[in-house]
Image (cartoon, grey):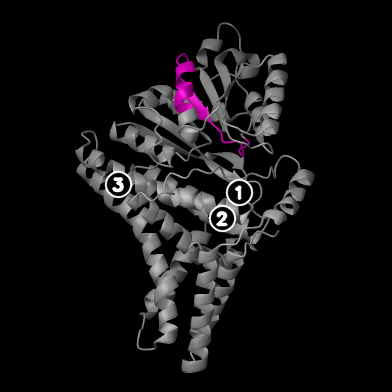
Amino acid sequence: MPDPQTVTPDTVHLFPTVVVQLPMFNEKEVCEHVIDAACALEYPRSRILVQILDDSTCSETRRRIEHKVFEWKERGANIAYRWRSNRSGYKSGAMEEAMEDIAAYEYVAIFDADFDPEPDFLLKTVVYLRDNPAAGFAQARWVYTNGDESVLTRVQEISLNYHIRCEQYARHAADVFFNFNGTAGVWRRACIEDAGGWNHRTTVEDMDLSLRAYLRGWKFIFLDDVTCPNEIPACYDAFRKQQHRWSCGPMQLWRAATTAVWTAKDVPFAKKCYLVVFFFGTRMFATHVVSFFLYCVLIPLCATAPEVTIPFWALVYAPVLVTLSTIAFTPRGWRVAAQYVLFENAMCIVKLTAMLAGLLHWSNAHEWVVTTKLGRFVDKRVAASVPEKLKRARKVYARELCMGAFFLSCGLYGVCVHAMWYYAIFLCAQGVVFLAFGLNYVDGR
């Protein structure tokens, strides 16, 4: 595509039409910034629409959005504001309702409110879809603005980098299924419609749509060299809710879509097996179950009952290898390798119960809570004051406190009764981390 700064009436048709969707819900700390970033994208204004999809119940958030919309309209931007009085279907419901307004546009770029796309984002991504008619979406790589803020954000950065830079990249390179990450990417509108549109039957609408499009024969593109900054949850409560949604949703989809996977005509049998057995069964289910029972059940039992033994390779070599291969994708990740292991183990109870909620359709399975954003890349002074406000609303989590007491009890029993110091060191450290999670003291507040 030509340079947008030198576009003429004779060359403007070379730019495909794009709608930039910004789904929001009570995100007053970041709503203005993402609107500014979307309206500043380098693209001919006659070929782009910025569409704000707002479900906010907060009057201050709505006021800020409306002010920004008015400001950019005055500056000549093609911008539309859709507000709903209900949250039916949550994010996917808002995007599904908005489809009726974008029939004239070829591509749909999506940015959550805590993302900060570079001005040339569309120029770097849309061209891949234009040149690959079989591609349904192009996904950019996430990078993080506040990864060094605390141990909690650093640990999340390690986990997210492994998922984005290793898993997603490897799946794309191997030509097997990988899902849209919900934001920082561009969809072909025809692909969305062909796959049946957005659906809120699970809490992972991005993975759901990706899977249905994949079963229809669409290809996907992962762009490792195109990045989009975003903010990692800095508060444990927000991180906990995010992990619940991310662990519960795939189990809902696994249960709902398995039949569709096996009966899909455009997918080879080997790739069907990969989807059902490895993508969902192993990565989304078995890894969390194994982690929970190894670290949270078997190892504590070994300290209290010496007759229960775990092979040394399973106790040491395998976990060390997994940890090293995970932190390798984050610069200087080795500095918090021990904290990463302890924090990941402490999340096992949250992930396991979320998985069970998704598989068994518990009452909280469809709980969709927007991850709180503090606006770390917007105004450092304002963001720094937010945790002080949150101190007054600190929550306590009973499951984590119980696990902390259990680990400490097992560690002390192992030392006092069986002199098993090598288990006690790990168990006491893990118990302290569980207590810190339970008391909500892991985010630097």
Mark 3 element type:
helix
| Label located before the other in sequence (3 or 1) | 1
For residue 255, the mark is: 3
Asked if residue 106 is among those painted magenta in the image, a careful observer would answer yes
Residue at numbered disc 2:
156
Amino acid on which the number 1 mark rests in the picture: Ile
- The amino acid on which the numbered mark 3 sits, given as a three-letter code, is Arg
Q: Pinpoint residue 441: horizontal percent, then vertical percent.
A: 65, 63
Q: Up-down: is 201 above or below 11?
A: below
Taking the spot 51% from the left edge, 55% from the top edge, the residue there is 159
From the viewer's side, name the closer residue of 338 and 295: 295
Question: Which residue is at the far right?
Answer: 381
Give the Cα separation between the discs numbered 2 and 3. Answer: 27 Å
Q: Earlier in the sequence, mark 2 or mark 3?
A: 2
Residue at image coords 60%, 16%: 44
Is 128 positioned to the left or the right of 439 in the image? Answer: left
- Which three-letter amino acid code belongs to the residue tagged 2? Gln
Along the polypeptide, which appears first: circle 2 or circle 1? 2
Count all numbered tags in the image, as a single digit.
3
349 and 77: which is toward the camera = 349
- Count residues near mark 3 (Cα–Cα under 10 Å), then give few for <14, some for 14-19, many for 20+: some
User: In the rendered structure, which segment of residues is drawn in magenta?
Assistant: 95-116
In this figure, which residue is indicated by the disc labeled 1?
A: 232
Query: Please, is residue 404 above or below residue 131 in the view?
Result: below
From the top left corner, tell me how far across and down residue 346 is, in percent.
51, 65
Q: Is residue 359 left or right of residue 141?
A: left
368 in magenta:
no
